[in-house]
Image: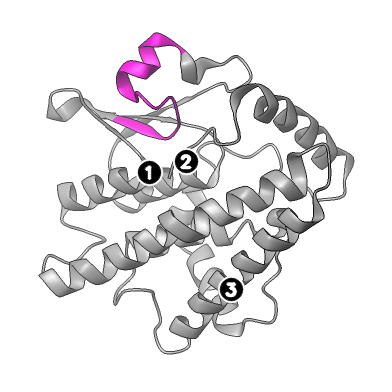
Amino acid sequence: MIELFTAATPNGHKVSIALEELALPYEMRVIDFARGEQREPWFLQINPNGRIPAIVDHGAGDFAVFESGAILIYLAEKTGRLMPADGKGRSLVLQWLMFQMGGVGPMMGQANIFFRYFPEKIQPAIDRYHAEVKRLFTVLDGHLARNEFLAGDYSIADIANWAWVRTSKWSGVPFDDLPHLTRWVNQIRQRPAVQAGILMPPSKLSGAEADTEKARKFVEEARKIVVTGGPDLDSE
């Protein structure tokens, strides 16, 4: 049994989607950021960095893994699925996984901070991160013009990038003008395991448009956490 420590964020959903795709039995514990649960000693024993997601594989001697990319690799190698075994195929998956971890996730995360959560609107920062996110989306679109998925067959690279790209409206970066990225996002969204994974746990924003009262309340709650707990409460 795998125990998943998570929250309704793109990095958290990367792992729940993978667990659903791999049909691995798991139990979920949602970490309460508002209460500072991620900084409690028991959790720091699992993830010294105090971030989500993290897992404990109780079937492997209570082995703990933190950092969402490392978790995805661990689960793929544990099951022999969602990542090729041959060297070149594995490298392709890892390249696009690192593209998300080093680019898409951090840049969208900073766009969220400056565009949604900071009390002051620092326009040069917003413009900088919006431009970089759109550039990264354009890279994905160009690659997907020639490939159905990012690295051969559907893999953890697709899961990692999709979990972030699907939240683009919240970051303020539409991609309606990128047809191949749009096709890929919609195609992956149809997978039953993906639909189940993004509900583990469900987001408080589910079904809400960015300018609704529900969204405004979410921003107010998130702003308090950002100000008191730092800008990154989940990890790549």
Cα distance in 3D space between marks 2 and 3: 24 Å
Q: Which residue is mark 2?
A: 12
Q: Which mark sits nearer the N-terminus, 2 or 3?
A: 2
Camera-nearest label, 2 or 3: 3
Label 3, residues with CA under 10 Å away: few <14, some 14-19, many ≥20:
few
- The residue located at (68%, 44%) in the rendering is 113
Instruction: Please tell me whether mark 2 sits on a helix, a strand or a loop.
Output: helix
Q: Which mark is residue 68?
A: 1
Cα distance in 3D space between marks 1 and 2: 7 Å
- The residue located at (42%, 43%) in the rendering is 16
Is there any visible trace of residue 206 in the rendered image? no
Return the residue found at the far front.
124
Residue 168 position (above or below residue 222): below
Asked if the magenta segment contains residue 213, the reply would be no
- The residue located at (53%, 80%) in the rendering is 141
* CB-based contact (under 8 Å), mark 1 and mark 2: yes
Asked if the magenta segment contains residue 43, the reply would be yes
Camera-nearest label, 1 or 2: 1
| Amino acid, disc 3 | Arg
Q: Which residue is mark 3?
A: 135
Query: Exactly how many numbered labels are in the figure?
Result: 3
* CB-based contact (under 8 Å), mark 1 and mark 3: no
Stretch of the chain drawn in magenta: 40-55
